[in-house]
Amino acid sequence: MRIAIIAGASLLLASTAAIAYCQIDVLGVSGGPKDKAVVDANGNLRVPGAYRATYRFLGSWSVASDNGSGAKQLHVVYASPGTIEAYRKDGSFPAGAVLVKEVYEAATAPMTTGTVSHANTLKGWFVMVKSDGNRYVHNELWGDGWGWSWFDASNPSTTTSTNYKTDCRSCHLPAQATGWVYVGGYPPLKR
Ligand code: HEC
């Protein structure tokens, strides 16, 4: 009996440790293995290196050309592993969730399906990382529950953004009620 209890207790301990490790791993901002991949100790972001292989596709946006047909830009959005599952469960983004938006200059041509625009030149990335508290209060790229940064295509490790309030916030105000994210464009988040 005693052996069974001890075995049960250590199993519980082991699984608690596994869950804790798992959360840190997924969070990526709490000192876990993926920490350095997106956020450094001061809260500065970078574009996650392997996102095209390891992240999930969320959705895409087409920005219409000002004159003529087709798109002038295409935006392709990815989410870090676990984000979609967590959002579908409770309708909010979990701490550590990373969203990457690629911005492409589009090219338009007649194809057998019609007049078609496709992703052509990558201009850069917008990256958002969901905060797990007030960890980076002195970093002006963090606020309203997220870390925010833009990266030119030539430099995925150093942002050119200086303050999310002037660089990002006003444009994301229409999405404030949905956690600052334009969730309407992402079919995998729909329940
Ligand atoms: C000119 C307005 C504008 C600015 C400035 C802007 N955004 Fe956005 N952002 C949008 C809109 C609108 C969308 C969704 C539609 C689209 O991509 O065209 C979006 C989508 C995103 C997405 C995909 C997830 C989502 O919210 O739907 C990320 C990530 C993102 N923006 C990050 C940023 C960051 C970081 C900054 C500042 C460095 C920023 N944005 C500045 C308007 C803007």
Image (cartoon, helix red, strand yellow):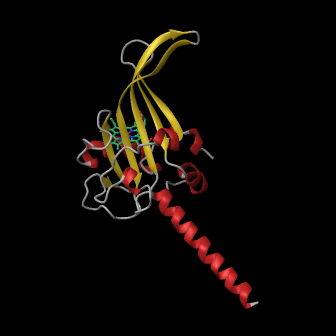
User: At 44% from the left edge and 58% from the top edge, which residue is drawn?
Assistant: 33
x, y percentage for residue 77? Answer: 47, 38
| Front position in the image: 73 or 122 | 122
Left or right, residue 141 beside residue 14: left
User: At 39% from the left edge and 19% from the top edge, which residue is drawn?
Assistant: 65
**Ligand 1, what quadrant?**
top left
Image quadrant where one finds the N terminus:
bottom right
User: At 53% from the left edge and 39% from the top edge, which residue is drawn?
Assistant: 57
Q: Up-down: is 66 above or below 154? A: above
Left or right, residue 98 beside residue 81: left
Residue 140 visible in rendering: yes
| Front position in the image: 7 or 133 | 7
Residue sitting farthest toward the front:
3
How many numbered marks appear?
A: 0
User: At 56% from the left edge and 55% from the top edge, which residue is drawn?
Assistant: 86
Residue 55 visible in rendering: no
x, y percentage for residue 42? Answer: 28, 58
Residue sitting farthest toward the bottom:
2
Quarter assignment of residue 75: top left
Q: Up-down: is 8 above or below 73? A: below
Q: Up-down: is 6 above or below 49? A: below
Residue sitting farthest toward the right:
1
x, y percentage for residue 173? Answer: 37, 45
x, y percentage for residue 67? Answer: 37, 14
